[in-house]
Image (cartoon, rainbow, N blue to C red):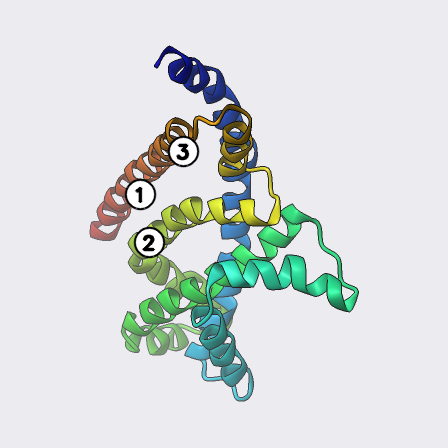
Amino acid sequence: MQDVWQVVVQSFPQLLSRGLLMTIPLTVISFAIALVIAVVVALVQFAKVPVLRQICRFYIWVIRGTPLLVQLYVIFFGLPSIGVNIDAFPAAVVVFSINEGAYAAETLRGALESVPAGQLEAGRCVGMSYVQIMWHVILPQTFRTAFPALGNELIDMVKNTSLAANITVTEMFFQAQRIAGRTYQTMALYLEVAVIYLIFSTVLSLLQRLGEKKLSAYGRQ
């Protein structure tokens, strides 16, 4: 038992540093890119742009209908077979961004459609362009409505980054696997990394609730 605790104590700084230096940056970068993708895809569907709307629906259908792990393998292990080589971290960013973009696009589309249609007409009546109406009127309300769902998706992404270990990204779970292979304390180490993921998720959940309260108070003003 003493050996187990020694491994846990010694490994904690290594796991936490991998979480802070790799897991969190991977999540933040991927989620930021995913939001850009989601906004574009949601707006194209909302505006019913010919052809592009069908392309967006096809993108969402494919991404939501295939496992994230398979997508990681296609990009990292599959593309080299046709001469396209991407390093592990950029490959993970690409996959997580595209994957989350599809889910977030549907969240934003639903939020866009919940905004009263009269908002567009009101904006036109005061001389605003379509872009101005979307930027200053529609999108702020959309993000306020979609905030809880997007927060949940961000928390899910933090946990899903553990799949990046399968393509050799040296994030937190990959580091735990390395240490476990050296010490054979698999149960203790995997429970330890689970606790760290739980800490990250809890912090994000608290921030999400704080954000919801702020947005709720802002909406009542």
Give residue 208's mark.
1
Instruction: Determine the CA span between mark 1 and mark 2.
Output: 8 Å
Q: Quadrant of the N terminus?
A: top left
The residue tagged 2 is 147
- Residue placed at 49% from the left, 37% from the top? 173
Instruction: Determine the CA span between mark 2 and mark 3.
Output: 31 Å
| Pair 2/3: label in front | 3
The residue tagged 3 is 190
At label 2, the amino acid type is Phe
> How many residues crowd mark 2 within 10 Å: few (<14), some (14–19), many (20+)?
many
At label 3, the amino acid type is Tyr
Q: Quadrant of residue 171?
A: top right
Picture layout, residue 35 above or below residue 201: below
Q: Secondary structure at mark 1?
A: helix
- Residue placed at 40% from the left, 33% from the top? 190
User: Is the C-beta separation of discs 1 and 2 under 8 Å?
Assistant: yes
- Residue placed at 33% from the left, 54% from the top? 147
